[in-house]
Amino acid sequence: MTARALFWVHDPEAPSFRHRLAAHVPALERAGIACEVETFPRRRYLLRILERAPRLADFDLLVIAKLKLETGERAAVRRRARRIVYDFDDAIYFGKPERPGEEPDRSPRRVRKFRATCAIADLVTAGNRTLADAARPFARRVEVVPTGIDLAGYPDGAPGSPGGARIAWIGLPGNLPYLSIVEAALARVAARRPALRLTVVSQRPPASFAAPVEFVPWSKETEAPALASCDVGIMPLEEDDWTRGKGGFKLLQYMAAGLPTIASPVGVNREITLDGETGFLASSPEEWERAIERLLGDAALRRRMGLAGRRRVEENYAMPIVAKTLVNLYRDLLERTPG
């Protein structure tokens, strides 16, 4: 099979696109699907489509990555594109809350654009079951495709820190407020364990924090070594309609690095972190404190859970496994008659 696929994305460097789709371009091209990525403007409605519509005839497949097309744009794209895939890994039918605990923006216009974009797609690929369920009433076909992780960047058997007291958090700056959920628990543990450090891997550190923080500026080169130098990975979240749609990718990163995880039992976190096997689920400040204390105080437990987490990633979320799923879905779609 020889085919051409065009990817539309607002930001080709966004983590969601790099890990979910761009990382699979080599596998797609080995399968005979030549790929081209095009930056899609956030403004200039309709004009942006008119500028791009003539090229759609040159491609067998258009992949729309997290965009929500406007009225008028959707019909123009559907008329010209032979086959359409719509991919997303966040609850993009809502707006992100300003602060943890606040309700997401439920703008009717936002929801309407999401539903209508799903409706023009031949296939919707969603990052987890919550997201797939949101698309299913409006889409022809919906498949769950988790975000894969490249284990080559995470050596097996990472040593952790010498003192067994470094806790990792990795994420975009917009998610730093979720650390407030675990701040008091970390401060209490730090009072008993002066060596404790929260290693924050991001573009900027938290503005202030009650427990000791070590800031590691994020880069593609630094993220894996920074996590490998830690002992426990955390993912605190408030539960709301936005967070239930999160993909849990940072948990996969921790597990790939051989770290046990502690996570809020929200959305896909319940599926990724196996409570008592690869880490712990914690709902209250007291549960967070107990889980942190237990893992920091037991190197053998950290090692056992870290190895179990690594195996779980190898068996379910490794890049070749997810790439094979995506290649098969695209090839199946390409083998069907367009339209």
Image: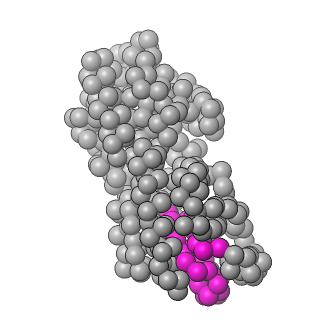
Vertical relation: 60 (above or below) 257: below
Instruction: Name which residue lies at 50% across and 78% down.
Output: 121
**Residue 302 found in image quarter:** top left
Residue 265 x %, y %: 30, 47
Vertical relation: 139 (above or below) 299: below
Q: Which of 39 and 57 is in front in this view?
A: 57
Residue 262 x %, y %: 34, 36
Vertical relation: 36 (above or below) 165: below
Instruction: Name which residue lies at 61% across and 80% down.
Output: 81
Look at the image and say whether residue 60 sits in the magenta stretch: yes
Q: Nearer the viewer, residue 246 or 94?
A: 246
Q: Residue placed farthest to the front in the image?
A: 1
**Residue 78 found in image quarter:** bottom right
Q: Which of 110 and 219 is in front in this view?
A: 219
Residue 53 x %, y %: 71, 80
| Image-based side of 257 in relation to 46, left or right | left
Q: Magenta stretch: give its range.
A: 59-88
Q: Residue placed farthest to the left in the image?
A: 276
| Image-based side of 308 in relation to 6, left or right | left
User: Can residue 241 be seen in this snapshot?
Assistant: no
Disc tally is 0
Q: Quadrant of the N terminus?
A: bottom right
User: Can residue 78 be seen in this snapshot?
Assistant: yes
Q: Nearer the viewer, residue 255 or 194?
A: 255
Instruction: Name which residue lies at 38% across and 62% down.
Output: 144
Instruction: Name which residue lies at 62% across and 32% down.
Output: 221
Residue 90 x %, y %: 47, 60
Vertical relation: 137 (above or below) 217: below
Look at the image and say whether residue 130 sits in the magenta stretch: no
